[in-house]
Amino acid sequence: MKIEGLDYNTQREKLMMPEYGREIQNMVDMAIGLPTREERQQAAQTIVSVMKRMSPQPQGTENAEQKYWDHLALMSGFRLDIDWPYDVSKAVHITTKPEPLAYPMQDIPVRHYGSLIFELLEKLKTMPEGKERDILTAYAANQMKRSLVQWGHGSAADEKVASDLARYTDGKVQLDVDTFRFEKVDIVSDTDKKRKKK
């Protein structure tokens, strides 16, 4: 619906620097159209002083003054013909978005155990029997139990952990649930911690 006299932001041209608002953009557009270089220079100085009042930088910030001139150059689309007090040729990098970071996706059988547990299980496959392997097996089993409790995937029974441990180490590590003692996993305290954080 178009009503004469009503002008919505959604119908207007998109702002290059929305943090300064449409009025500053209008001032920049007006400055571009001024006939003489002196008038444009004076208008640019005035616009930058208004920008400083709208968005003050902390004292001692390096290149704070240049930042405003860079913003002015961007808002004018580099069409403002004045004597720039700073080199604004690199201002275009302000609006350039960085490349997205590649997320390190790993193919693991079940996500609730996490990739570090599966790295540990791979190491356990190749380790000779002994005290070091027993310590790592105990660590892996206890962490797997905590993960099952935390993520609520089915049963967190000791037999489930022993079964998964044997399965993911290709049967090389067998955990005797009758003799092995798991660390106590306090489900209530974990829930309480989450509630307290909220």
Image (cartoon, rainbow, N blue to C red):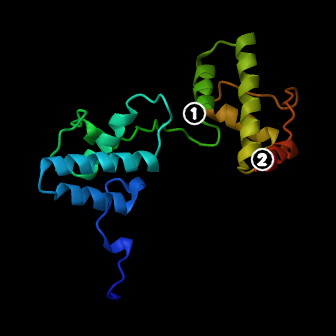
Comes first in the chain, label 2 or label 1: 1
Q: Residues within 10 Å of mark 2 (few under 14, many from 20)?
A: few
Q: Quadrant of residue 90?
A: top left
Residue 136 point in image, percent of width and height? 71, 20
Give the residue number, with chain letter if any, for mark 2: 194
Secondary structure of residue under mark 2: helix
Q: Nearer the viewer, residue 158 or 50?
A: 50
Residue 57 point in image, percent of width and height? 47, 38
Under mark 1, the amino acid is: Ser
Q: Nearer the viewer, residue 184 or 136?
A: 184
Residue 42 point in image, percent of width and height? 24, 48
Say above or below: 98 vs 138. Answer: below
Q: Nearer the viewer, residue 116 or 172?
A: 116
Under mark 2, the amino acid is: Lys
In the drawing, does residue 54 fall left or right of residue 33?
A: right
Q: Nearer the viewer, residue 178 or 99?
A: 99
Task: Give the foreground label among 2 and 1.
Answer: 2
Residue in the picture at 36% in, 35% down: 65
* CA gap, disc 2 and disc 1: 24 Å
Give the residue number, with chain letter if any, for mark 1: 115
Residue in the picture at 65% in, 29% down: 171
